[in-house]
Amino acid sequence: MDLHPIHTEDDYNRALGEIARYFRAQPEPGTPDGDRFDVLSTLIEDYEAKHWLITGV
C-alpha cells in the first residue's frame, strides 16, 4: 500500500488491514517498518477524528 491521506472508507479499511500486521509483530522504532507504522497510525487517527464523533455518555 502506498501511503497517502485517507479520503474514503475504502482507503480507511485498506489502512486498517495494513496496520494489522504490525500488531502481530510490532516493528522496532526508527526502522522503515516502525516509521510506516507511525505514519499509518497518524493517518488512521486523523481520519477517525474527522469522521467518527466520539462523545462521552
Image: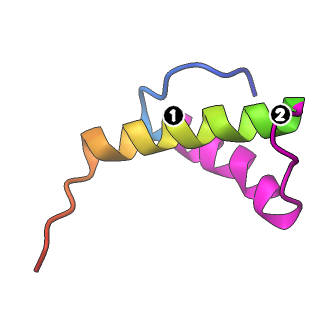
Q: Is residue 16 left or right of residue 49?
A: right
Extreme left residue here? 57
Q: Is residue 9 left or right of residue 32?
A: left
Q: Is residue 22 left or right of residue 12?
A: right
How busy is the neighbourhood of tag 1: few (under 14 within 10 Å), some, or many (20 plus)? some
Identify the residue at horizontal 87%, vertical 47% (top origin): 28
The residue tagged with tag 2: helix, strand or loop?
A: loop
Q: In the rendered view, would you say 5 is above or below 31? A: above
Q: 47 or 7: nearer the eye?
A: 47
Q: Is residue 3 left or right of residue 22?
A: left
Mark number displayed over residue 30: 2
Q: Quadrant of residue 9?
A: top left
Extreme front residue here? 30
- Mark 2 or mark 1: whose residue is earlier in sequence: 2
Dominant SS of magenta comes to helix
Q: What's under tag 1, amino acid-wise?
A: Leu
Identify the residue at horizontal 56%, vertical 46% (top origin): 13
Mark number displayed over residue 43: 1
Q: Quadrant of the C terminus?
A: bottom left
Q: 50 or 1: nearer the eye?
A: 50
- Residue 51: where, in percent of width, then height? 27, 43
Q: What's under tag 2, amino acid-wise?
A: Gly
Q: Which residues are magenta?
A: 11-31
- Residue 44: where, in percent of width, then height? 50, 42
Q: Quadrant of residue 54?
A: bottom left
